[in-house]
Image: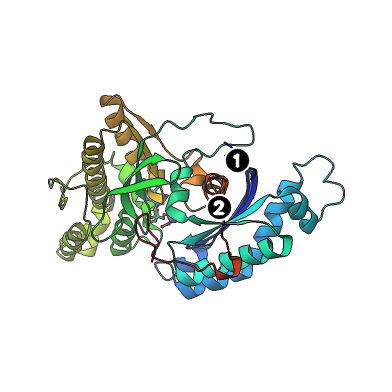
Amino acid sequence: MAGNIQTILAIDTSCDETSVAITMGRRIIAQRIYSQIVVHRAWGGVVPSLAKRAHEERIGTVIDACVKAYAHTIPHARGAYSRDSTIQNHVDAIAVTYGPGLAIALEVGIAHAKQIALQFHKPLIAVNHMEGHIYSCFAQNRNGNPPESFTFPYLAMLISGGHTQWVLVSGHGKYSIIGSTVDDAAGEALDKAAKLLGLGYPGGPVIETLAAQVQNKDRYAFPRPMIHTDSVDCSFSGLKTSFYYFLQKMTQQEKNDALPYLASGFQEAVIDTLIAKTKKALDQTTCSRLLVAGGVSANKRLRSVIRKVMRERQGTVLFPSFPSLSGDNAAMIGVAGYYQGNAGNIVSHIDQLERLPRLDFDRHR
Ligand code: KG4
Ligand code: ZN
């Protein structure tokens, strides 16, 4: 690729993770992720004002730790480490998530990215968080593994706490939305089910563990709204409502006894829905290469069902290159920023960059 941006300092503060990474092309050289889960757990979900405060308290330390880890990889720079000279001499550009996400959380990362870009006269690259999730499937370690090269087009299924969407990726930066949830995101549905079961936040991993205890049995056959429609759009709110009323009819003892089956039944309904719509999207786009990214892509049951489906269809599937890249992270922002920046997408007036909490592939506000 032509272009002179190689080393990027990337920042993501879109939700409840304060993350900073240094990437070189697709390679992750250093990354630090400070998770705020403990801050939000007591409230059963992410509280924006607490997220903002935690980002503000931590971001300076997270940037320092990441730059320091990077400096350790540079020959001759180790002896006299200085954050400023490392950024000045060994970073080509700054990338930051500007949306979608929580407005007051995004602002923290953007403010720091602007400040660093201005102080060191570096170009600033504004990255769409969901585009970052797509690129998490192509991130590499320091040695350039996995070596997988790009073979467009891909169908990307992006499944997180805030999003569930199918996007056709026809080239770097070329996206079209094929379908989306019309209400809750898959992760949000799992989180809400976990809350109804008294399992705390975040719900996805707990539900996955409980379901595995009963070999992912589907004892209850909860509804799968919109599963048979021709469109790739999906819905989870009917499932949630039906789950709620189902639990209302049970005593606490019955709920306790059936807990793994309840978790498993809910998870199977979510997975079935995602699979049905993925098949539709693959058919509609005649695409045979699937990318699956976002927090819910960590789910092992989902992964195994998807692998089977793609084997049957003689297609391929890529998940985020490393387990730590399923959830929110800045490395994916650095990798996406590398392609954006070298394609000339640089912020022209740094002080005017604003957060866009509702940014989407086809909508900018
Ligand atoms: O991408 P992400 O970290 O943050 C957002 O941008 O939303 O996704 C968080 C979501 C949460 O809803 C969480 O419950 C879900 O991902 N999640 C999982 C698993 N790990 C995280 N869902 C199912 N199975 C998992 N193992
Ligand atoms: Zn995310």
- What residue is at 58 percent from the left and 66 percent from the top? 349
Quarter-wise, where is residue 34 in the image? bottom right
Earlier residue among tags 1 and 2: 1
Disc 2 marks a residue whose amino acid type is: Ala
- Name of the residue lying farthest toward the right: 79
Quarter-wise, where is residue 99 in the image? bottom left
Quarter-wise, where is residue 250 in the image? bottom left
Compared to residue 209, the image places residue 239 above or below, namely below
Quarter containing the C terminus: bottom left
In this view, the residue in front, 100 or 19, is 100
Compared to residue 316, the image places residue 101 above or below, namely below
In this view, the residue in front, 102 or 251, is 102
Q: Secondary structure at mark 1?
A: loop
- Dot 1, crowdedness within 10 Å: few (<14), some or many (≥20)? many
Is the image coloured rainbow, by chain, by secondary structure, or in one colour? rainbow
Residue 70 as seen in the image, left or right of residue 276:
right
- Label 1: which residue? 25
Q: Secondary structure at mark 2?
A: loop
Say which of marks 1 and 2 sits in front.
Answer: 1
Disc 1 marks a residue whose amino acid type is: Gly
Q: Position of residue 56 (x, y in %)?
A: 60, 70
Spatial CA distance of label 1 from label 2 is 14 Å
Quarter containing the N terminus: top right
In this view, the residue in front, 335 or 205, is 335
Compared to residue 160, the image places residue 354 above or below, namely below
Q: Position of residue 343 (x, y in %)?
A: 53, 46
Q: Position of residue 202 (x, y in %)?
A: 41, 58
> Which quadrant does ligand 2 occupy?
bottom left
- Name of the residue lying farthest toward the bottom: 49
- Label 2: which residue? 330
Query: Is residue 318 visible to us here?
Result: yes
